[in-house]
Image (tube, grey):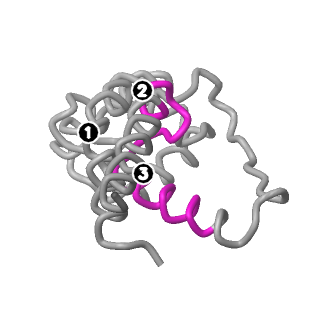
Amino acid sequence: MRSFFETYFLYRIVQSIINVVMEMFPSRLRALRKQRKLTAKEFGEKFNLAESTISGYETGARNPDIETLEKFADFFGVSVDYLLGRTDDPSPKEIEYEDLDDEERQFIRELREIANQKGLDLTSPEFLNVFKAAIDLAKRISEDQRN
């Protein structure tokens, strides 16, 4: 179980890079919709969403939840990572955890859940740099508290 500090710290890390990762989503969504020759209204109707909601997604004024992202990815036959701009490869990727213990798997699931809720890429260079810095800071704080 994570301490409040650890959970809050991870949350702040995720929050700090939301804008960096979400920049690609609006243009990718619009391009994929146009490739299918759908208007924003027609596309929205397929998901029971208003034209204004789709427009908000395509301008970056709104962000979809993870369930909606997954539905869009399935509809277009691309990965969520592709929609979010985390990869230029539209093919879905399989993740394997065979070499991790249960605690490591749980940590990754929790981190991935937070990231997915915020539409973030755990493997982007920006996220990894911020995450490394956060770990270094947490280590220094922990060492200071022991001294």
Q: Position of residue 85 (x, y in %)?
A: 47, 27
Structural distance between the alpha carbons of marks 3 and 2: 13 Å
Near mark 3 (Cα within 10 A), the count class, few <14, some 14-19 or many ≥20, is: many
Q: Position of residue 116 (x, y in %)?
A: 44, 53
Q: Nearer the viewer, residue 29 or 13?
A: 13
Badge 3 amino acid: Ala
Residue 119: which quarter of the image? top left
Badge 2 amino acid: Glu
Residue 115: image tag: 3
Q: Which residue is mark 1?
A: 16
Q: Which residues are magenta?
A: 106-128
Q: Position of residue 32 (x, y in %)?
A: 47, 27
Q: Earlier in the sequence, mark 3 or mark 2?
A: 3
Q: Which residue is mark 2?
A: 126
Residue under the image location 27 percent in, 54 percent down: 49
Badge 1 amino acid: Ser
Q: Position of residue 82 (x, y in %)?
A: 54, 32
Left or right: 108 in relation to 12: right
Q: Secondary structure at mark 1?
A: helix
**Residue 8 within the segment the image draws in magenta:** no
Which image quadrant: the C terminus?
A: bottom left
Q: Main secondary structure of the magenta part?
A: helix
Residue under the image location 49 percent in, 53 percent down: 71
Q: Earlier in the sequence, mark 2 or mark 1?
A: 1
Q: Earlier in the sequence, mark 1 or mark 3?
A: 1
Closer to viewer: mark 1 or mark 3 = 1
Q: Nearer the viewer, residue 3 or 18?
A: 3
Point out the residue furthest to the right here.
Answer: 98
Closer to viewer: mark 3 or mark 2 = 2
